[in-house]
Image (cartoon, rainbow, N blue to C red):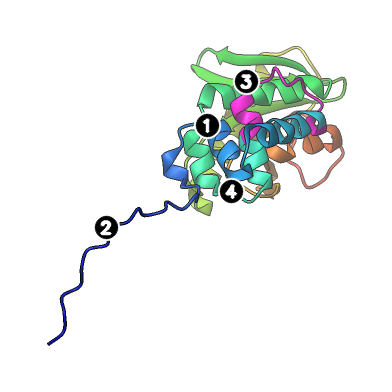
Amino acid sequence: MKRPRRAYAGKVRSLDIPVPGAFTTPEQFLTSKLGSKAAAERSIAAVADQLGVSQEAPRSTLAAIALAKLGADLDFVAKSLDWEDFEAFCAVVLTASDYEVKRNVRLRKPTRQIDIVAESPSLVLVVDCKHWHRALGLSSLEAIISAQAERTGLLLRGRPTTKPHLPVIITVLDNQARIVNGVPVVPLQGLKDFASSVNRFDNELSFIGS
């Protein structure tokens, strides 16, 4: 007769495996992933330096970008990132890229709101900061782009300027920039490169008013 198994009475050693759901902020997840707070601080500092922004910028967003660079689950990163910090950080990066930035620009007749209007000497970026928690299908993305193009046209109609205006979507989830129907969809970690390289003479982009 087989003896019944005895319950193990010793201590069970817990495994130190970071579980995304156990952390409430990108900073906490980054600290766990890198193994120490000091390593997380170095990673955050490196991101701030790369983007040319102060470490006083929203730290949760700096940590989120660091996590994205480490290959962390972007869906979790998006869910853990506060939308206000996300939007504020986009404004910080664009300001550091020598754009004059206005946030939460309101239009009337019809009533619309634009997250960020960023103006350089040669063009105006009309930015929609999309803090979605999942990747979107092409039809949903096209609807978002169409709405942003409409807002861009309405903004241009009420402004005394001849500068071309470009609708832009900034997101957390995408790994690389892409152009959909002439509108750039830019991941947060690629925003600085985009802001410094976007050209009013790029034929792939659908500038309005050019």
Residue of label 4: 72
Mark 4 or 2: the one toward you? 2
Q: Amino acid at mark 4?
A: Ala
Q: Mark 4 and mark 2 in contact? Answer it, CB < 8 Å.
A: no
- Which label is found at residue 88? 3
Inspect the magenta stretch and tell me whether residue 59 lies in it: yes
- Disc on the earlier residue, 3 or 2: 2
Residue 184's spot in the image, x, y percent? 69, 42
- Which label is found at residue 81? 1
Residue 46's spot in the image, x, y percent? 78, 34
CA distance separating discs 1 and 3: 12 Å
- Other-residue count near label 3 (Cα within 10 Å), few / some / many at <14 / 14–19 / ≥20: some
Q: On the rendered structure, is 127 left or right of 192?
A: left
CA distance separating discs 1 and 2: 42 Å
Q: Nearer the viewer, residue 184 or 148?
A: 184
Residue 205 against residue 99 in the figure, above or below: below
Residue of label 2: 9
Inspect the magenta stretch and tell me whether residue 54 lies in it: yes
- Asked which secondary structure carries label 1, the reply is loop
- Disc on the earlier residue, 1 or 2: 2
Residue 111 against residue 204 in the figure, above or below: above
Q: Amino acid at mark 2?
A: Ala
Q: Amino acid at mark 3?
A: Ala
Residue range highlighted in magenta: 50-63
Instruction: Identify the residue shown where x is 20% and y is 68%.
Output: 6
Mark 1 or 2: the one toward you? 2
- Disc on the earlier residue, 4 or 3: 4
Q: Nearer the viewer, residue 129 or 48?
A: 48
CA distance separating discs 1 and 4: 13 Å
Q: On the rendered structure, is 25 left or right of 52?
A: left
